[in-house]
Amino acid sequence: MNLQETLSILESLADEKVRKQHIKGGAHENLYGVKMGDIRTIAKKIKTNHSLALELWDTENIDARMLAILILNPKELSAAELETMVSSEQFTWAADWFYNYVVKEYPDKEQFRERWMNSDDVMLARAGWSLTSGRIARSPEGLDIPAIIKRIELEMANAPKEVQWTMNSALVQIGIHHPTFREQGLAIGEKLGIYRDYPVSKGCTSPFAPIWINAMISRKV
């Protein structure tokens, strides 16, 4: 399957409702509005096709990029290519897919973490805090947790909304996985009040840090 054939299939699956939802969520106009399930179905048929994935990514079409994420091989990306791709996608849904399917699977992702956290590029900073959140939860050895907490306390309130989301995730992971710092994390969450009034669907957990932390702790008991 070549680029034009793939784009034609994506276009044929366009759903105006999905398109409007994505635009409302911050996507630009270059998209068809293909349902996630349909994109996954196409990806299963194509399997891994790194060269096609790069072509799809270069179109800047949201649906094409979502498909590209599922069919590329992270190990074939250079560090420069990966960083450019992270920086180039402003739609947070697609950016988070890229993080979960590509950045997390990159062989030497730690090389980016601190540099991205300190970047003026909003999307790099968002991904850097995501990497830090993952380290806090799964491999905290060597992390300066008190310094991370201090940065969150001082910076999160004024951070761009894209970065605020993953900084909040890092705060939550500290509260869940590091009992020594739990009360401090809860207090910072209460003081900052970020996402306190965030609308949440029935059955979902609020992203407000104190609620999220306590909900996860209660499940462990």
Image (cartoon, grey):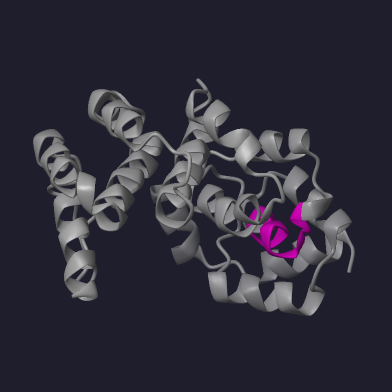
Say whether residue 128 is left or right of residue 160.
right
**Quarter of image, res 146:** top left
Q: Which residue is at 59% across, 40% downward?
A: 89
In the image, 182 versus 75, the foreground residue is 182
Which range of residues does the magenta coloring cover? 64-74
Q: Is residue 88 visible?
A: no
Q: Residue at x 62, y 59 (%)?
A: 101
**For this rendering, which residue is in front, 219 or 124?**
219
Q: Quadrant of the C terminus?
A: bottom left
46 lies left or right of 115:
right
Viewport quadrant of the N terminus: bottom right
Instruction: Out of 114 and 98, give the one closest to the viewer.
Output: 114
Question: Is 117 displayed left or right of 99 in the figure?
Answer: left
Residue 47 screen position, x and y as percent: 79, 73
Residue 68: within the magenta? Answer: yes
Q: Write down the quadrant of residue 112 in the picture.
A: top right
Q: Position of residue 119 (x, y in %)?
A: 52, 23
Residue 213 appears in the picture as rendered: yes
Relative to 79, does residue 7 appear above or below in the rendering? below
Is residue 95 positioned above or below 118 on the image?
Answer: below
How many numbered dots are placed on residues in this image?
Answer: 0
Residue lying at the far top in this picture: please name it.
Answer: 120
Horizontal and vertical percent position of residue 193: 13, 39
48 horizontally vs 161: left or right: right
Residue 218 location (% of width, % of height): 16, 71
Q: Is residue 132 magenta?
A: no
